[in-house]
Amino acid sequence: MTWLLVSNQIARPTAAAINNCTRRGLRTDSPASILAIGTANPPNCVRQDDYADYYFRVTKSEHLSNLKDKLKRMCHKSAISKRYFHLTEEMLDHHPEFTDRTSPSLDARQDIMSTAVPELAAAAATEAIAEWGRPAREITHLVASTYSGAHMPGIDFHLANILGLSPSVRRTMLYMNGCSSGSAALRVAKDIAENNRGARVLVACAELSLVLFRAPHQADADTLIMQALFGDGAGAVIVGADPVSVEQPDFEMVSASQTMIPESKDMAKGRLREDGLLFLPSREMPTLVRENIEQCMVDALSPLNIGCGGWNDLFWAVHPGGRAILDSLAASRVILREYGNMSRPSVIFVLDELRRQQEENEMGVMLGFGPGVSVETMVLRATGSQKKI
């Protein structure tokens, strides 16, 4: 601390010195770590082999046999085995507007999601808190993320109340950020945890494909892409630095970065309309990601002296957006197969799966891809605590 000598007397420290000392005191001694993970899905499960028949039956569109055959081919090639949905046939019976493209349905969808999304997020968060081993009221920060509905107050407010978090919990809400948002939320949590000594950050991501659900139409075959890939789920992670004895870190969050790929604004667009969210992933997106991901990796790993020759020794936590992106990534393939693309919660499911596989590699990389095209890159170090699973 800087002291001033005035008239042979020791003066009080300057305001700048006090500020610098306070800031240093807030910073943690170690990088943030993932301390616990929880996941949740709705109970309604549909096998991928049956989905085309199910979808065209519930939308009363079986006369569109050419589109039905196309969806069957897409489902067969998707590498997905089953998906979970909050939407049920009973719900569709009560809301025929969900399958009528000429009828506004956003209000009804919002009403359902305003309750269902925070409840699903709470199920995943409850599991994470139980694994963490400390009381929910010791959560200091909450980062919540979804594109399933937009409300004020948001799911962060409702989730805090469901879980019984402290009224002073500091909340951050991320809306409409696409599939990379799970990774982005973890990046935000890392920054919070490392700059607020003693902070414990709950990250909660939840999605319901109800916001994407619509009937097929001959003039809009791209709708089938959404129907073939997306499922419902929630993931929660507790992030903190300088763990205490009861806490068992799974992954140390070494570094994090975000990159926008040039000339990619039309590669993955979403628009919220009267009949829900229309998401249009370009067929060129997997190619664009493959062409640019190497530079993202170099930028993230070079400062850690990990060259291209060492990449084969890394473990990988990659958002399972689709078969074309995954290639040979074991944990991500498992999540895509068992749940489909759940958007932002998916990468949390992948981290949970990596714990089950108990990877031998110490260093790894988490990757998330979203509209923009944005690439979220986080370097992780496995701590060896995964054996608690």
Image: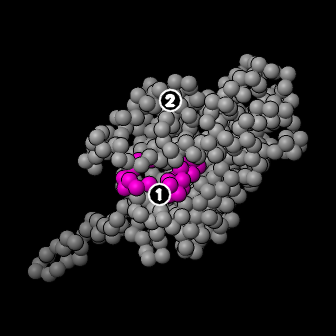
The numbered disc on residue 358 is 1
**Residue drawn 87% across the image and 45% down it:** 90
Q: Amino acid at mark 1?
A: Gln
Q: Which residue is mark 2?
A: 286
Q: Is residue 348 visible?
A: no
**Magenta-colored stretch includes residue 127:** no
Q: Residues within 10 Å of mark 2 (few under 14, many from 20)?
A: some
Return the residue found at the far bottom.
9
**Quarter assignment of residue 124:** bottom right
User: 103 left or right of 15?
Assistant: right
**Residue drawn 66% across the image and 61% down it:** 122
**Residue drawn 52% across the image and 24% down it:** 284
Q: Residues within 10 Å of mark 1 (few under 14, many from 20)?
A: some
Q: Amino acid at mark 2?
A: Pro
Q: Looking at the image, which is closer to me, 86 or 181?
A: 86
Q: Is residue 65 visible?
A: yes
Q: Which residues are magenta?
A: 344-366
**Residue drawn 56% across the image and 38% down it:** 321
Pinpoint residue 48: horizontal percent, then vertical percent: 71, 38
